[in-house]
């Protein structure tokens, strides 16, 4: 009896027997996994009807600034259509920079309690499964009407931040605006250009002035990042991968990695999320915060560091922990992703909590920030819609649209549903990995041990970057050890990959 989780599917009932239809197989597995984990694979009919009849938000309206003339741009994945965020920056006298971060005004078209809102509240997040994305909002919203796509007028909620050359945020203002994305950019192309490894991307070259804009934004992001690192923001690199298809045939799993463009957007998101949280607290609003608490397993982190010859203090402190991580990234980059994963597990998962003004904020240990409220991805996360409604009420001088008990119930629900969504993504990812290894039983691979406990021993191979369980000759293996393994089984339906130690 194998105790690993997985959908109890009969491969004969799915397209798995046809090697040309692996996308269909993964979609079948993903849909069943969504149902098994209490998520809605498709919006209900009422939500689809709301999406079908919806019209774009028109006109600036009272209190809405017309900022369509600015050189707004977005940076996201190559194929992303659900664009939540655009940016523009302006140099100020004295060396400071004014950064405007525009966030899609989803609430303007998705009123609280509407069918689309109820569906979004049920799932609370978009689910990115191999072979299929289950968007939190119907695609007519997330990929069109509430997306900050290029060359269309859209409503946004803007965070205006004043950032000094040293990365300090000395001023913040918030307002609604009518915006127009002038340039849709992709992470990989922008990162290669910023790193000096490629020429100016064609999309940047088409719009005069945007290239200089992105360079300025990158400088500001570097300064913001330096401040967070001084405060102890953790340097982590875990291996995540996405499926690459050739038509309907799964061709590969490709490891995702951070780059300069992703770091730019991440630093702006963190800055905006913190500024929004502080603004709402100053207005007396209870808020839903994204929280990573001080690790209860700090003693185990101390022991882990000691195994690598590094001494951490007895009391939890992100700054020496980050110094340890930075040293390991420099001296042992190959095994750093696995060390990062171990640290992430020992720190514990993120969750949503409610902060009441006047009480100590829960904080985010991994980011080393005191105030953090998810607000920058309302097309993809329900907590961001909740925060957006709070922010708009505060801007307009209205009372909070949520009672304290409602916020607490939503925080608990969003945490639970996010966990279920992550299980779906992992489950389907394992099936995709097993699919790639089908037909390779008996082949041997170089691997690294990623887990060893009473529950089992796990290894990760490099190509494709997948993890599996060692079911034979596993005794004595230690985390971080290099080992040669032979593929014993690849079960697509259950997402099981079994290896034997050679």
Image (spheres, rainbow, N blue to C red):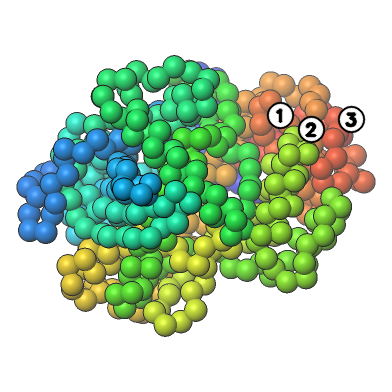
Outermost residue on the bottom side: it is 358
Which secondary structure lies at badge 1? loop
CA distance for labels 2 and 3: 11 Å
Residue sitting at 39 percent across and 20 percent down? 201
User: What residue occupies the far front of the structure in this picture?
Assistant: 94
Crowdedness of circle 3 by 10 Å Cα count: few (<14), some, many (20+)? few
Which mark lies nearer to you, 3 or 1? 1
Tell which residue pokes out farthest to the right in this image: 476
Q: Which residue is mark 3?
A: 502
Which of the 4 image quarters holds residue 316?
Answer: bottom right
Q: Residue drawn at (72%, 41%), measured in percent from left and top?
A: 329
- Using the image, determine if residue 148 lies above or below residue 40: above
Residue 274 image position (x, y, % from top left)? 42, 61
Whole-angstrom CA distance, mark 3 to mark 1, is: 17 Å
Measure the alpha-carbon separation of dots 2 and 1. Answer: 7 Å
Residue under label 2, please give it.
Answer: 447
Can you say which quadrant of the picture contains the C terminus? top right
Q: Residue 440, position in %: x, y? A: 72, 21
Position above or below: 307 against 288: above
Label 3 SS: loop
Discs 2, 1 touching: Cβ within 8 Å = yes
């Amino acid at each position: 009896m194998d105790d690993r989780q997985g959908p109890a599917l009969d491969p004969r009932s799915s397209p798995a027997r046809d090697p040309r239809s692996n996308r269909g197989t993964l979609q079948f597995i993903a849909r069943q996994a969504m149902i098994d984990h209490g998520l809605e694979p498709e919006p209900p009919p009422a939500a689809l009807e709301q999406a079908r009849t919806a019209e774009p938000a028109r006109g600036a309206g009272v209190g809405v600034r017309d900022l369509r003339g600015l050189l707004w741009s977005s940076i996201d994945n190559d194929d992303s259509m659900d664009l939540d965020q655009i940016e523009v920056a302006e140099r100020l006298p004295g060396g400071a920079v004014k950064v405007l971060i525009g966030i899609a005004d989803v609430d303007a078209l998705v009123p609280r309690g509407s069918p689309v809102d109820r569906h979004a509240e049920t799932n609370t997040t978009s689910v990115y499964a191999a072979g299929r994305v289950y968007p939190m909002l119907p695609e007519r919203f997330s990929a069109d009407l509430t997306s900050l796509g290029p060359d269309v007028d859209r409503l946004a909620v803007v965070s205006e931040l004043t950032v000094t050359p040293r990365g300090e945020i000395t001023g913040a203002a918030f307002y609604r605006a009518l915006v127009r994305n002038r340039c849709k950019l992709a992470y990989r192309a922008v990162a290669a250009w910023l790193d000096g490894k490629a020429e100016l991307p064609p999309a940047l070259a088409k719009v005069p002035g945007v290239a200089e804009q992105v360079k300025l934004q990158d400088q500001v992001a570097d300064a913001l990042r330096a401040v967070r690192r001084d405060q102890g923001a953790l340097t982590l690199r875990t291996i995540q991968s996405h499926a690459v298809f050739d038509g309907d045939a799964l061709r590969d799993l490709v490891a995702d990695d951070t780059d300069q463009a992703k770091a730019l957007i991440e630093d702006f998101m963190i800055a905006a999320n913190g500024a929004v949280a502080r603004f709402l607290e100053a207005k007396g609003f209870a808020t839903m915060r994204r929280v990573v608490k001080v690790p209860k397993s700090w003693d185990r982190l101390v022991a882990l560091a000691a195994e690598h010859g590094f001494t951490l203090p007895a009391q939890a402190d992100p700054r020496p922990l980050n110094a340890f991580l930075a040293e390991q990234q420099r001296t042992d980059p190959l095994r750093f992703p696995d060390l990062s994963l171990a640290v992430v597990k020992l720190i514990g998962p993120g969750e949503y909590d409610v902060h009441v003004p006047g009480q100590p904020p829960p904080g985010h240990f991994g980011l080393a920030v005191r105030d953090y409220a998810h607000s920058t991805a309302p097309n993809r996360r329900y907590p961001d819609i909740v925060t957006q409604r709070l922010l708009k009420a505060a801007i307009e001088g209205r009372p909070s649209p949520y009672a304290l008990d409602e916020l607490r119930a939503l925080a608990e629900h969003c945490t639970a549903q996010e966990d279920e969504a992550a299980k779906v993504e992992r489950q389907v990812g394992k099936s995709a990995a097993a699919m790639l290894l089908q037909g390779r039983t008996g082949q041997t691979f170089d691997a690294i041990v990623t887990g060893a406990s009473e529950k089992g021993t796990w290894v990760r191979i490099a190509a494709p970057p997948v993890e599996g369980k060692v079911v034979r000759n596993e005794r004595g293996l230690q985390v971080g050890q290099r080992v040669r393994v032979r593929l014993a089984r690849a079960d697509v339906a259950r997402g099981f990959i079994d290896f034997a130690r050679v």
